[in-house]
Image (cartoon, helix red, strand yellow):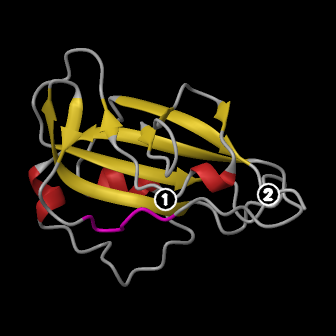
Amino acid sequence: VSLPQARGPPITLHAGVQVPQNDTAGPPTFHVAGDVGKGPFVVATLDPDALTPQDPTLAQIRHFLGGNFHNEGGLLVNSTPAISEFLQPTPPAGSDAHRYIFLLFHQSAEFATQTLVNSNTSITNFNISTFAAAVNLGNPIAGTFMLVAPPTS
C-alpha cells in the first residue's frame, strides 16, 4: 500500500508503521508481492478501533471496498468504481492511534452480484468476516496495517 503525498514521494506502508493523519488523504495505490495470480481481487480497508481502541462500539468502519483489481507486475489496478471509495483515516481527538487494516481477497463470482453493501450502506459496524463469508471470498490472501493517531494540537 502506498499513500500519495502532495509534496514528495509516496509513503509505502510497512506493517505497523505509524503515519501522520495529514499524510493519509489518499487514495492509496495497492501492490502485492508473491505469486497470487492475475486476479480479479477484492481490496478492503477497515478501522477496527472506532470509536476508540478502548471503546470499539462503531467498529469496524469500512474505509474502502473495491473489486475487479488485477495484478499488473505487482501493482493492483482496476477500472470499475469502488463500492466504498477511500475514506481518509480520522480518529477522533483524544483517541489513541487506530489500526487501519488493508486486506486482499481472491474475488468470487458472488462478489459481482452482491447486494449487502453499496454506496448508501452505513460504513459503521461493518464486519469483514461476515461479508467475506456471505459473498464467498474466503480468507484474505494478503494484508498489512498502519497506525494513525489524531493530530496533536
Q: What is the total number of numbered labels drawn onto the structure image? A: 2
Whether 84 is among the magenta residues is: yes
Residue 66 coordinates in the image, percent (x, y)? 27, 57
Q: Main secondary structure of the magenta part?
A: loop
Q: Secondary structure at mark 1?
A: loop
Residue indicated by mark 1: 127
Is residue 52 left or right of 22 when viewed as pictured?
right
Q: Tell me the amino acid under the disc marked 2.
A: Pro
Labels 2, 1: front one? 2
Nearer-N-terminus badge (2/1): 1
Q: Residue at x 12, y 67 (%)?
A: 113
Q: Which mark is residue 68?
A: none
Classify residue 42 as left or right of residue 84.
left
**Any part of residue 14 in sight:** yes
As rendered, which of 97 and 137 lies closer to the eye? Answer: 97
| Residue found at x 40% / y 80% | 121
Magenta segment: 82-87
**Label 2, on which residue?**
151
Q: Quadrant of residue 26?
A: bottom left
Neighbourhood count class around disc 2 (C-alpha, 10 Å): few under 14, some 14–19, many 20 upward? some
Task: Tell me if residue 55 comes above or below residue 138 in the rendering.
Answer: below
Q: What's under tag 1, amino acid-wise? A: Asn
Quarter of the image with the N terminus is top left
Q: Is 151 in front, or is 45?
A: 151
Question: Is residue 38 placed above or below 43 in the rendered structure?
Answer: above
Q: Residue furthest bottom?
A: 120
Does any portion of residue 129 appear in the rendered image? no
Residue 77: x and y in percent read: 18, 44
> As drawn, is 105 to the left or to the right of 36?
right
Q: Position of residue 76 (x, y in %)?
A: 22, 38
Per the model, the C-alpha gap separating discs 2 and 1 is 27 Å
